[in-house]
Image (tube, coloured by chain):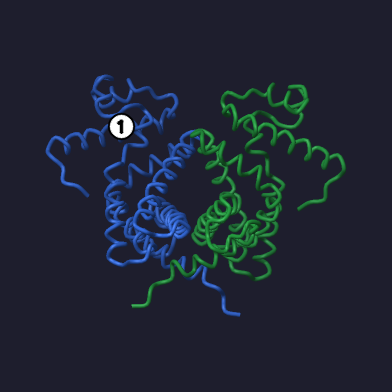
Chain colours: A green, B blue
């Protein structure tokens, strides 16, 4: 999404390594029982160094994604300015987020298992989703999309996202979900299916 | 939804009174700072009596709705058995829930403010929504609806519900939302708008 300096790239790589080793611990020992000292130790790092990369244990599961949110907001505005419908604009935003995540499927599968096994983490994730939705709605509002339209397309966009994300992490669950079916492909499938499912049946 | 005995009716009325007085406290003093002793006292009741109606403070905000969920499940199955599409069946379920809530708008407005001012409660509410969705998906699955269809119609139904519920609690936000516009009317509005919003634009 954005051009990174060598220092930023290194930092991003270390963060990913820490996330990967922390997730392994969370899955094996449970999130609540895992300490930051253990996570740091697994990555051959001091506890003090850990805090150069993450503010706390929770941030390892829910890393700051301000850069991605901002980029998505800019894309939304460009799409609306180009005359696309609010739904097309939101969908373009979802596609961009999907592209960013394509390489992280294995890690995100473990992350999902960890979050789903812990009610507090499930709640935290849902609150994160609500924050994302609020940001996107705010941007649509600034771009002149009527409030009730913005709310609805964001809520539905989120529903489409959730289902595409689920299928992607689950692997082959529908006929055409070959292994390697990308998240962005699932997004398109779900969008297409949705139109068929909710269209009034001929009477 | 179900026929109540006089004792059940009385119990339901006391629970509603406790909810109303607890919500007043939560809004004024904050959820975390309110004690069960205060809630009971406001309702001229002992702390011990409070526990005959609710297991804990949280249950006042998130009361058990097993009866409503079960009734919704039965309605879903009847709708599928009658040959309706999964989307029509889910929508019928949402309508039934809406009808149950129509009389509680003022209380639900206070409840929303309390929940939204507290991150932990927001998370708790989202987890409740996920539990509802899991139940409904489970029932659709038993009724022979393919898994990926069930997931999608429930996710979209939830998006439609959320937006209709928001409009209903907000009051007049769209042109046709006259004061007294019922939740079930908002549901129909949102369902209708959704079709227009996501339909492919002619090229």
Find the residue positioned furthest to the bottom. Answer: B203
Give me the chain letter of mark 1. Answer: B
Query: Which residue appears at 53% of the width and 58% of the height?
Result: A160
Residue B4 point in image, percent of width and height: 16, 42
Q: Is mark 1 on a helix, strand or loop?
A: helix
Q: Is residue B50 left or right of residue A109?
A: left
Q: Is residue A128 left or right of residue B82?
A: right
Quarter the C terminus of chain A occupies: bottom left
Residue A175 point in image, percent of width and height: 54, 63
Q: Front-most of B132 and A136?
A: B132
Residue A180 picture quarter: bottom right
Residue that label 1 marks = B21
Instruction: Say whether residue B176 is visible.
Output: yes
Q: Front-most of B33 and A197?
A: A197
Q: Front-most of B203 and A177?
A: A177
Q: Is residue A132 left or right of residue B139?
A: right
Residue A73 point in image, percent of width and height: 67, 55
Residue A70 point in image, percent of width and height: 69, 50
The mark total stands at: 1
Q: Is residue A180 left or right of residue B197?
A: right
Asked if residue B151 is positioned above or below residue A193 in the image, the reply reads above
């Amino acid at each position: 999404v954005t051009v990174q300096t060598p220092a930023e790239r290194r930092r991003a790589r270390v963060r990913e390594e820490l996330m990967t080793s922390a997730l392994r611990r969370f899955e094996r020992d449970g999130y609540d029982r895992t300490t930051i000292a253990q996570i740091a130790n697994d990555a051959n790092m001091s506890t003090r160094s850990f805090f150069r990369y993450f503010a706390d244990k929770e941030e390892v599961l829910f890393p700051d994604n301000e850069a991605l949110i901002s980029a998505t907001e800019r894309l939304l505005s460009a799409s609306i300015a180009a005359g696309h419908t609010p739904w097309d604009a939101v969908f373009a935003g979802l596609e961009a987020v999907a592209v960013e995540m394509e390489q992280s499927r294995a890690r995100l599968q473990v992350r999902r298992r960890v979050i789903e096994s812990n009610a507090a983490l499930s709640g935290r994730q849902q609150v994160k989703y609500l924050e994302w939705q609020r940001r996107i709605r705010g941007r649509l509002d600034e771009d002149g999309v009527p409030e009730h339209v913005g709310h609805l397309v964001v809520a539905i966009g989120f529903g489409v996202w959730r289902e595409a994300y689920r299928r992607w992490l689950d692997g082959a669950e529908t006929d055409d979900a070959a292994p390697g079916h990308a998240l962005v492909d699932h997004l398109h499938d779900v969008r297409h299916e949705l139109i068929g499912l909710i269209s009034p049946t001929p009477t």
